[in-house]
Amino acid sequence: MIQRLLAVGLLAGLLAGLAVAALQHVATTPLILAAEVYETAAEQAHGGAQAQEHAAQEHASHENAWEPAPGLERTAATSVATSVTAIGYAFVLLALMLLSGETIEPKRAALWGACAFASTGLATSLGLAPELPGAAAGDLAARQLWWIGTAAATGAGLFALLRVERPLAGAFGVALLIAPHLIGAPEPAAPASTVPAELAARFTAAALAVHALTWILVGAAVGFVWRYFATKPSLETTA
Amino acid sequence: MTTKTFSADAILSPSRLEILRAALVVFTLGAGLVYLAGFSYPSVAHNAAHDSRHSLGFPCH
C-alpha cells in the first residue's frame, strides 16, 4: 500500500511540478529578475530609507552561502524546488483523500486541489500577498507560522463545510475560515518597497494563477496516476 | 476467540488500518518535502528555492 502511495505521489507530483516550473519560467521568474534590478539599484544608492536597509539586511544573511549561478543553473534550482513542493503537495493530497475515505479519481482529486488552492493560495494571500524581492515584510518566522495556520484552518474549515453532515459543522467551518483573518497576518513596520507597484501587482496576479494551476494539476495528476496504477494488478500485489 | 477476532475486524479491518497508517506516513513525508522546499532556513535551501518560494506564495525573506 505504502509503495503504491509513494509511487503515485512521486510520479504525479513530478509531472505537475515540471509543468508548473515551465510556466514559472515564463510567467513569474522574469518579474522576479526585474524586481532584483530595482532592489540592487536601491542597495547601491545607499539611501537611508527603511526598505533599502531591510533589503540589504535580508540579502547579507544569505550572501555567503552557495547560490545558483544566473541562467540555466538558477532555472534548474527553481525547477527542482518547485517539483519537490509539487511532490509534497501530491503526498499531502493523497493522504488527506484516503484519510477521509474519498474515491480517488481525476475530477474529484482536481476539486480537492481547488480547495487546497483556496487554503494555501487564496486565504493566505488575503494577509500575505505573494511578494517580489525588495518588498517590505514583517518577521519571517511569524509570517510562516501565520501562513501555515491559515492554510490548515481554511482547509479544515472547507472540509467541515463541504463534507461533515452534522449540526453546527457549517458554523464551525465558517469560524475556521474567518479566524485567521481576525488574528491578522504579521505586518511590516512600514509599507515601503523598492519594487514599483505596477510590477508587484502583476507578480501577485501571476503567482496566484501559478499557485492555482499547481494544485489543480497536482490533483488531476494524482487522480490519473492512481487510476493508471489501479488497472495494473501486478503493481498492486507487489505494493 | 473467533468472536473476539470478528469484533476487532468489524471495528477496524486490517486493510483499513493499513491504509490509515500508510496515509499518515505519506502525509508526514509530504509535509516534510513542502517544508524543505518552502520554509526551511539553511541559506543553501533558501538560495536554491528562492524563485520557487516567491512564485508559489511562500513567505521568503
Image: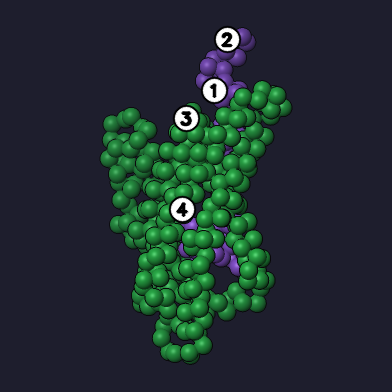
Q: Secondary structure at mark 4?
A: helix
> Which three-letter amino acid code belongs to the residue tagged 3?
Glu
Camera-near label (2 vs 1) is 1
The chain letter under disc 3 is: A
Residue B21 found in image quarter:
top right
- Left or right: A43, with A170 as reference point: right
The reply to the same-chain question for discs 2 and 3 is no
| Residue at image mark 1 | B12
Near-viewer residue (B37 or A99): B37
The reply to the same-chain question for discs 4 and 2 is no
> Which three-letter amino acid code belongs to the residue tagged 1?
Leu
The reply to the same-chain question for discs 2 and 1 is yes
Chain in green colour: A
Q: Residues within 10 Å of mark 4 (few under 14, many from 20)?
A: many
Is B4 located above or below residue A86 in the figure? above
> Which three-letter amino acid code belongs to the residue tagged 2?
Thr
Q: Residues within 10 Å of mark 1 (few under 14, many from 20)?
A: few
The reply to the same-chain question for discs 1 and 3 is no
The reply to the same-chain question for discs 3 and 4 is yes
| Residue at image mark 4 | A211
Cα–Cα span, label 4 and label 1: 37 Å
Near-viewer residue (A117 or A231): A231
